Structure formats: C-alpha cells, structure tokens
Image: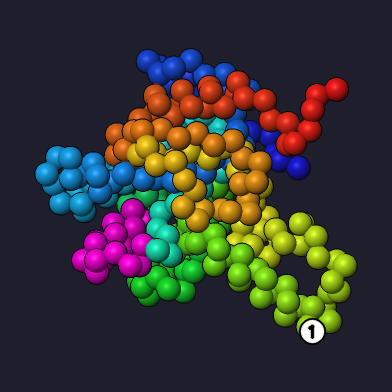
C-alpha cells in the first residue's frame, strides 16, 4: 500500500507566485523523459554540452519541487542504452556531469530525506560513476521522504529481455512452473521491482514518442507532452501539468457504474 504522502513544512512558502496546486490529488510516481538539451544549445549557437549543463539545473529544480509538494517517487530518464552511440566526447561529458551531480547533490538528498536509486545496465557505466552511484545510494538508503530514481544506460526492450531470461532460468531450474508466470511475477523481475508504476509520464521538447522508456510499467500511465525544451522546463509548467493530471479520469479500461 502506498504510504501517506509527506509534505514539506515550507511548501506553501515555496509555491508562492506559482500556479495554485491542490496537493490532495497529486500523482504518487512521476516519470520524465528529459529531452531537448542539445536543441536548446544549438538554438543559441552553443556547444551541446552547455545544453546538458543547463538541463542539470532543471533537474535540480524539479527534484526540489517534487520534494516540496510531496511527490513520493520521481523517475528521470537520464541516459538510455541508445545514448552510448553518441559521439565519445559527448558521452564523456555526460558522465562527468552525472558524477558532478551525484557529488554535489548528496548533501541536499541527505538533508531533505531523499533516497537515490538507479535502474538500467549500471554495469556498463564507467567505474567511477558506478562507485559514485553506489556510495550515494548507500548513504541515502534509509531516507523515506522521496525516491529519486535515475534511469541510466536504460532501455525498455533490454529490460524486458533481461526479465524473460531470468524467468526462463527459474523455470528451467524448477524454481517456478509456467502457470505461476503472472503480470506480478513479471514486475518482480524488472529493474523497478518494488516500485509502483508511474501515474504520470512527462516528455519535453515536442517529440511525441516513448523512446524505449518503461515499456511495461506505463501501461496505464497518464502521458503529457510539452513543446518546451528540457532546459526551459520550469517549476510553474510542472505544476500546471500536475493540475492537468488531476482533471484526467483514470478508468484502467473500465467504465464507471
């Protein structure tokens, strides 16, 4: 059962000059495809890396906003399996930004009761990134105010293939029988085991596609697309989307009686 949403003591002060938000109907789990860093930089005739740096500032803003208003889980699509195909210089810069983020935000996570988790092919990350991830996840593992879930070297199809292999191995070894394979068992063998599916998925930059993100988990997720490039995505627009989410009727394929 989802635990009662916690609210920051100064949340009303923090939301001053922002759209009015009724915090009673907030999504429990928000997932975001953070898209548009490169285009933001190109529009300004800047190096793409500067777009990623600006995007990191937006990450900080949205994480803080989620903590203030009581979002329990925030999953950010930070680096996909396909992103490894980008120019080596860009990948190296992205890894450096990630390490810097983990090191600079650890204190704030501890002070604000935020637990860090990572999903994906973490073993493909550079060793220093793996060490930084492990260290931050370890020191924040007992934090209960919010879960910050980073999707790193993540791909939805590869996650499903991994799940199929794990279940097939258990069946081969006699640990389970075919009849016991249920949606619940599938979920238990995904990277996100133990984490409720997202209630809301947001994609920035005007692209209207899922891009191999949480393919199993978003079966009944409400999806919002915005033309805003990720570095320009603001707290105010985020709150407006949350207000829009509350107006949607979630029937899960059923009809009201």
Residue at point 36%, 33% (across, down): 227
Estimate the x, y position of residue 98 in percent, counting from the top left: 34, 58
| 88 magenta-colored | yes
Residue range highlighted in magenta: 83-103
Instruction: Give the farthest residue toward the front.
Output: 208
Residue at point 52%, 44% (across, down): 31
Residue 43, by quadrant, is top left
* Direction from residue 106 to residue 189 in the image, left or right: right
| 193 magenta-colored | no
Position of residue 140 relative to residue 82, above or below, is above
Estimate the x, y position of residue 155 in percent, counting from the top left: 50, 61
Specify the quadrant that holds the C terminus.
top right
The colour scheme of the drawn protein is rainbow
**Residue corresponding to mark 1:** 173
Position of residue 41 relative to residue 191, above or below, is above
Is 162 in front, or is 236? 162
Instruction: Give the farthest residue toward the bottom.
Output: 173
- State the SS at label 1: loop
Estimate the x, y position of residue 62 in percent, counting from the top left: 41, 37
Q: Is residue 87 visible?
A: yes
Residue at point 39%, 45% (across, down): 34
Is 120 in front, or is 110? 120
Task: Considering the whole magenta stretch, tell me its main secondary structure.
Answer: helix
Is 45 in front, or is 199? 45
Position of residue 45 relative to residue 232, above or below, is below
Residue at point 61%, 57% (across, down): 192
* Direction from residue 184 to residue 115 in the image, left or right: left
Position of residue 169 relative to residue 59, above or below, is below
Estimate the x, y position of residue 193 in percent, counting from the top left: 66, 58
């Amino acid at each position: 059962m989802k635990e009662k949403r916690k609210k920051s003591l100064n949340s009303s002060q923090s939301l001053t000059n922002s759209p009015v938000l009724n915090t009673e109907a907030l999504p429990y789990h928000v997932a975001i495809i953070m898209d548009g860093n490169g285009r933001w930089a190109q529009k300004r005739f800047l190096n793409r890396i500067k777009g990623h740096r600006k995007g990191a500032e937006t990450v900080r803003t949205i994480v803080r906003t989620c903590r203030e208003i009581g979002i329990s889980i925030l999953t950010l699509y930070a680096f996909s399996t396909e992103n490894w195909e980008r120019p080596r210089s860009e990948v190296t810069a992205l890894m450096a930004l990630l390490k810097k983020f983990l090191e600079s935000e650890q204190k704030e996570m501890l002070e604000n009761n935020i637990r860090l988790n990572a999903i994906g092919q973490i073993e493909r990350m550079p060793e220093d990134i793996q060490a930084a991830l492990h260290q931050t996840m370890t020191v924040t593992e007992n934090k209960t105010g919010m879960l910050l879930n980073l999707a790193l070297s993540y791909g939805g199809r590869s996650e499903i293939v991994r799940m199929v292999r794990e279940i097939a191995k258990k069946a081969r070894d006699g640990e389970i029988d075919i009849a016991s394979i249920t949606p619940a068992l599938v979920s238990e063998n995904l990277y996100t085991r133990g984490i409720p599916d997202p209630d809301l998925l947001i994609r920035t930059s005007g692209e209207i596609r899922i891009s191999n993100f949480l393919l199993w988990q978003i079966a009944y997720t409400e999806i919002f697309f915005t033309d805003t490039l990720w570095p320009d995505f603001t707290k105010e627009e985020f709150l407006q989307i949350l207000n829009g989410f509350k107006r949607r009727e979630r029937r899960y394929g059923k009809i009201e009686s």
